[in-house]
Image (spheres, rainbow, N blue to C red):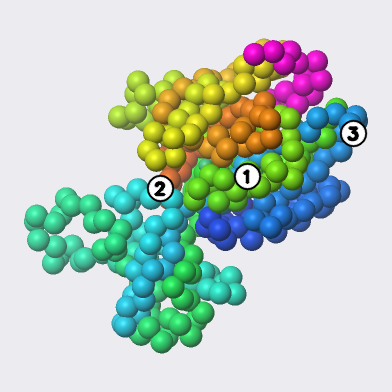
Amino acid sequence: MITIRLETLLRETCLIPALAGFEQKMAAYMQEKFEEMGYEVTIDLFGNCIAKVEGKDPEAEPVMIFGHMDQLGFLVKYIEGNGFLRLERLGGIPEKVLPALEVQVQNREGKMFDGLIGVRSHHSTPPEEKYVVEKYPKLFVDIGATSREQVEELGITVGSPVVYAPKFKRLLGDVVSGTSMDNRIATSVVLELGYLFKDNPPDMPVYLVGTVQEEFNLRGAMMAARSIKPKFAIAIDVALDGGTPGSEGTTHVMLGQGPVISHYNFHGRGTLNGTIPHPAMVRLFERTAEEKGIAFQRYASIGMLTDMAYVQLEGTGVYGIDIGIPCRYTHTPVETCNLQDLETTAQLVFAAVHNMKDMDLSR
Ligand SMILES: [Zn+2]
């Protein structure tokens, strides 16, 4: 059963632009919701939004549950004399989806301007260019301006954020599609957990966190962990779906089949980091899923990582795990998920936290 509350949280947050480093609107939204629930909220120096849920035992070791608020996108790199904007990318942008895409440009006051990524008219495209993917430095944004001065008068400068024009759509059944499902699915679940803990408080203090800059350098969550000092951490992020044409055999993860326990992720390109979850956390989630009758899926693959990779290394180490929500077409403007998976992820994480007081902490 999908609650209207969870769908509303997802719809509203998918429509909030929050490029990595510019998460203020998302943080303000989460802060407002958490404060309505009665929690104490802090926004730290980096912009992480941290809500504290009191535990029945205030002396117990704290748990940090987090999802990143930011999304990938671009920054304005250069403003042409005739008013077109050139872009620098921020995060893993799939270049083949960019031409003719609607975007929004944010000015210094946070006001959004509609724009689109221009593309050579089909009628004048020579045959040899028709099947070529343009690299992003060749692309430009058209906001309808005719001069650089006009752009600057709007408060748009070099460094202004540019994101996919925010969208949210409900497809058949409980399938939903939109911009920045990565990772508004998680921030929605983190908010939903706030409502669930209000009615049924945890044993240990729980910090519900919307983190920043995951799509940039994956380390914004570290700053939250340094103030919270969690002993346990649960990161929620996308898990790659293997159910679309061409993705068969890559992963068993399927939309609508439940939350995903990540057994291994690693980013082999540059960052050389990833997460092997603490076995105690894997056992906790397996036991909880079995007790509650919640179906779950498993994932183990290189090619991606989450900010858990850094959080688990804080202090003398953190009992960490990545919990995934199945998602198709990641990093495109049509990321697609199933609302059922958000609901069951919230239920599983909630029940796991309630099972933590008697968990076996051995490796
Ligand atoms: Zn993500």
- SS type, badge 2: loop
- Residue 342: image x %, image y %? 61, 34
What residue is rendered at 58% in x and 70% in y? 110
What residue is rendered at 87% in x and 38% in y? 54
141 sits left or right of 340 in the view: left
- The correct choice, above or below, for 204 with respect to 117 in the image is above
The answer to whether marks 3 and 1 mark residues whose Cβ atoms lie closer than 8 Å is no
Give me the disc on residue 92.
2
Q: State the extent of the magenta-drawn residues as a range.
A: 341-363
Q: Comparing marks 3 and 2, which lies closer to the viewer? A: 3
Q: Comparing marks 2 and 1, which lies closer to the viewer? A: 1
Relative depth, front residue between 362 and 158: 362
- SS type, badge 3: loop
- The correct choice, above or below, for 134 with respect to 161 in the image is above
- The correct choice, above or below, for 244 with respect to 19 in the image is above
- Magenta span main SS: helix
Give me the disc on residue 58.
3
What residue is rendered at 67% in x and 26% in y? 319
C-alpha gap between disc 2 and disc 1? 19 Å
Position of the N terminus by quadrant: top right
Q: Which residue is mark 1?
A: 221
What residue is rendered at 62% in x and 44% in y? 221
Residue 324, by quadrant, is: top right
- SS type, badge 1: helix
Q: Earlier in the sequence, mark 3 or mark 2?
A: 3
